[in-house]
Image: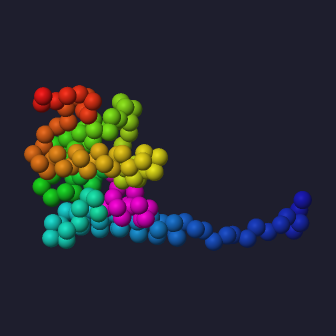
Amino acid sequence: MTEEERPRLQPRKSNVGRLATGRAKANIERAEWLYAVNQPELGITVSDVIREAVTNDALRRISLWQLLLSVPGWGEVHAARVIRNMHAAHGSTAAERKVKMNVGTIIDERRGGRLWVALADAMAREEAGGESVPAGFPYTATGL
């Protein structure tokens, strides 16, 4: 095939610019929500972010660790204790505990809301003084 017989390929317009813009918008939106959680005067809580993530795909990529660290007055110790207590209350397997949790994992329909309830319980315990979930909870008699 000679040069003249070869079909000319027309360069297509790339979607890279549009995709990069979408990613940047999602990053900004995630940062705004994390900032809002960190500002107590705004009244935005972790539960508000999780509730909004049901309809907002950008928020599903926020890591649970990041979200808990954005709570005013909480540091790594509080965040680690909440995650540990959440897994204990949920009855997570060792493999599930190793997976990096994000908001999308918490609201995953296949989990039936159990992780969200376990997270809410763990956060309530942390706010009440940081007591941890007893081993075997809720199947063992404690304090009897």
Q: Position of residue 106 (x, y in %)?
A: 37, 50
What kind of secondary structure does the magenta stretch mostly adopt? helix
Q: On the rendered structure, is 6 left or right of 66?
A: right
Q: Nearer the viewer, residue 138 or 11?
A: 138
Q: Where is residue 104 drawn, in percent x and y? A: 40, 53
- Residue drawn at the location 54% of the way across and 66% of the way down: 16
Asked if residue 138 lies left or right of residue 14, the reply is: left
Q: Is residue 38 magenta?
A: no
What residue is drawn where x is 14% and y is 50%?
A: 127
Of 17 and 85, the residue lying toward us: 85
Q: Point out the image quarter for the C terminus.
A: top left
Q: Residue at x 37, y 31 (%)?
A: 93
Q: Residue furthest left?
A: 129
Q: Is residue 5 visible?
A: yes
In percent of width and height, residue 92 lies at 35, 35
Give the image location of residue 24, x and y in percent. 41, 67
Q: Quadrant of residue 81?
A: top left
Along the line of sight, which residue is nearer the eye, 1 or 36?
Answer: 36
Depth check: give the residue in front, 130 or 61. Answer: 130
**Would you place residue 50 above or below residue 94 in this image?**
below
Q: Quadrant of the N terminus?
A: bottom right
Q: Which residues are magenta?
A: 49-63
Q: Is residue 50 magenta?
A: yes
When asked about the image quadrant of residue 50, the answer is: bottom left
- Picture layout, residue 46 above or below residue 41: above
Is residue 1 shown left or right of residue 29? right
Q: How many marks?
A: 0
